[in-house]
Amino acid sequence: MSYHLDALETRSSEERATALARDLPRLIAHAKKNSAHYQNILADIDAHSISDAQALATLPITRKSDLLQETGSKLRLADMVAKPLAQSDLIFQSPGPIYEIGMRNGDWWRFGRALAALGIGKGDIVQNCFSYHFTPAGMMFDSAAKAVGAVVVPAGGGQTELQASAMSQLRVTAYAGTPDYLKTILEKADELGLDCSSLRFAIASAGPLFPALRDYYEGRGIRCRQTYGTADVGHIAYEADAIDGLILDEGVFVEIVRPGSGLPVKEGEIGEVVVTCFNDDMPMIRFATGDLSAFMSGESSCGRTNRRIVGWRGRADQAAKVKGMFIRPEQVAVLTERFPEIERARVTVSHDGSNDQMLVQIETENKDPSSYEEAVRDIMKLRATIEIVAPDNLPNDGKVIDDIREIG
């Protein structure tokens, strides 16, 4: 059964307010002193005056687009961190590109809380199928498993037959990875006649967990729960035994704001997830994730008392998360700039019930779609179906990324 990682999960509302009044001013003062970015945007802010949610909502927002390390960009990774960059243990690159640091000390990204809530702990073997290459997801769940005392198989992505073989031979008890990749592994195991019945848990992230997919896992005796975070702020929210929303992590303060304004919305109204992360190494104050969600009323039936969100409800911008990787409008622009004959391009993201699908439609006189396959893989880091469209035939709606997946 699941268990609570620590006493923070069951604090009263009064205890949470007291902790926020203590931690917010300290975080802001620390960021202003040690981070060039926050020295700049919070220069006129009295840290001691920011001690509750209402005061926090008056501060400027930092957006993911601010972190893009484009040629000529004024904001660099060294401006965000609150320590000399040479004192970091790890540096990662997310699409954009965006660079983030990481540390090997403890559960630095705080995903251990999500594993504990599912019941993963000592005696478990976690097959970690998140990528260890450039992006931080692999290390996030590696350190999380260590935090709860589990053994890690650092599998990464791909090599599905090898994944299935390892899962069977090592008697793996828990999977960590994107929601749909476990199904691919299990189907390969079935095809090869491999026994993966030891698998009891699945912690899924980097994409929506569709109800049909959860039911498939439950039908195989696998308790699957989802967790939500980003490379920039780490863990944000997670499901416990009770599948009644995602409970906010104890290391962040979350606001739901109206996209484009930064103003908090009413409870239950869908808006953009904005996160303040209490991380002294790389503090994030009012970081806009670009994800849409909404607060739920009341508390989880599992006994945890922090606020809950309904889960992912799309993007505030036109970015889409496909198989754990963000596809951004900037990447579509790179594609069109690379080939002068391309007039416009549009990415459509769908789901066939098991896997995400990506269609890239290209307006061009060139009739050969294979001309662009390598470029799409290089720029977007994913394979896609390429479709040639006659000039002026894509919808004139301003969209370059259209996510048509239905979220259950």
Image (cartoon, rainbow, N blue to C red):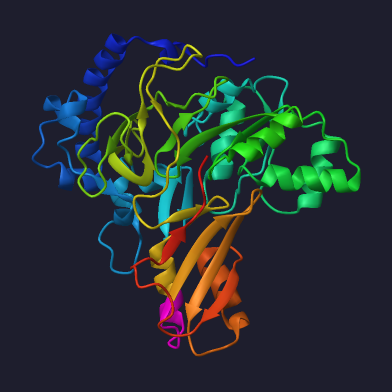
Seen from the viewer's position, the closer of residues 295 and 151 is 295
Which residue range is magenta in the image?
Answer: 335-344
Establish if 152 lies above or below 161.
above
Q: In the rendered image, which quarter is residue 271 located in?
A: top left
- On the picture, is 265 further left or further right than 233? left
Seen from the viewer's position, the closer of residues 265 and 10 is 265
Which residue is at 30% across, 10% downward?
15
Q: In the rendered image, which quarter is residue 269 located in?
A: top left
Quadrant the N terminus occupies: top right
Q: Please state the horizontal and vertical placement of residue 62, each as a whole percent of the image.
A: 26, 47
Magenta stretch: includes residue 88: no
Observer able to see residue 80? yes
How many labels sit on residues? 0
Which residue is at 45% across, 35% downward?
311
Establish if 81 lies above or below 336.
above
Establish if 169 lies above or below 259.
above
Which residue is at 48% across, 42% downward?
89
- On the picture, is 307 further left or further right than 27? right
Q: Residue furthest right?
A: 193
Q: In the rendered image, which quarter is residue 264 located in?
A: top left
Q: Residue furthest left?
A: 44
Which residue is at 40% across, 23% downward?
250
Q: Please state the horizontal and vertical placement of residue 131, each as a whole percent of the image.
A: 60, 49
Seen from the viewer's position, the closer of residues 21 and 343 is 343
Q: Please state the horizontal and vertical placement of residue 220, each as a whole percent of the image.
A: 76, 31
Q: Please state the horizontal and vertical placement of residue 125, each as a whole percent of the image.
A: 73, 29
Observer able to see residue 174? no
